[in-house]
Amino acid sequence: MSLLATGCSGGIGKYLSVDYDINFRNFQKDTSLIDLKTVAKNSSLLHLAAMTNLREVQDNPADSFKVNVTSTIDLFRNFAANGGKRFVFASTGHAYGITAEGRRSAENDMLNPLSLYAEQKISAETGLMREAENSGIELIILRIFSVFGKGMKNHFLPGRIESGLSNLGFSQKIFNSDDVRDFSSPEDIARSVYKSATIPISNLLIVNLCSGLGITVKEVVNSNFPNVQNHCFVAGNSNTPRLVGDPSLQNAVFEK
């Protein structure tokens, strides 16, 4: 069985070894540019590509909706029509909104998206589940929590810090630095994404990819970039002060 993927140049995708790299940006423009007829049959497709820059999503709602929702569903339909077996969709832990103190967000919790990006990911989840019902395609939805590691793009915090330190030194403000997040490295997330292509499931699986540990933004920056000065950190009243995932299902499924 072959393994296909989109987003292979992204922060997570670059750690994957796949048989076929689908250029999702071209697929959005013209499905004829991607001939899934020759590669989709009995394959698994890891769909990681997305518009992830929150400001870009907010400023371009129609374009981001096409990328994150309609083109994703079109890709699924094309994949199903050409004999694909399993579709793995990279969603977000931000679908849960805020995690209450003393608990961790679990897969059966009520969804409460607080950004347009999270709303679009939930719309894509809903559309994919509807498409999968009668398609015979196995669907896995991975709700990925915060990813923090070196080599990420500049619209992610670690990429912005790394870029600043490599030039004249990082002097920008890191707002809401007291927010609590559930951080994993891109390498760890990539390993779970890769495993998701072969784990046994029955039709549909929704699972968090997370560590289950909550630490502040300031703590994770200090541990990875000790040269960032204290004056860069600014506490604040974020609309998502705490977001921590429950890894129980992840541990049960991926550690078998």
Image (cartoon, grey):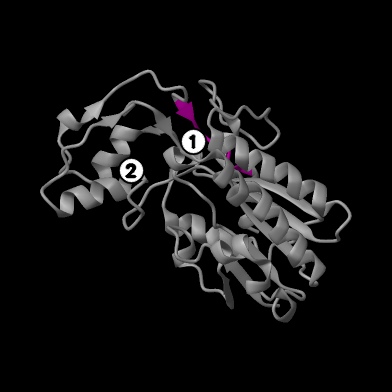
Evaluate whether residue 250 shows in this view.
no
Determine which quarter of the picture holds residue 122: top right
Query: Can you name the residue that lies furthest to the right here?
Result: 134
Q: Name the residue rendered at 17%, 49% in the picture.
A: 165
Q: Position of residue 192 (x, y in %)?
A: 56, 58
Q: Which residue is mark 1?
A: 58
Which sits in the foreground, 61 or 53?
61
The amino acid beneath tag 1 is Gln
Q: Name the residue rendered at 45%, 39% in the picture.
A: 54
Give the label on residue 181, or none.
none
Inter-mark Cα distance, 1 to 2: 18 Å
Instruction: Give the answer, above or below, for where 46 lies relative to 226.
Output: below
Determine which quarter of the picture holds residue 65: top right
Circle 1: element type: helix
Q: Position of residue 142 (x, y in %)?
A: 62, 49
State the extent of the magenta-drawn residues as a range: 242-248
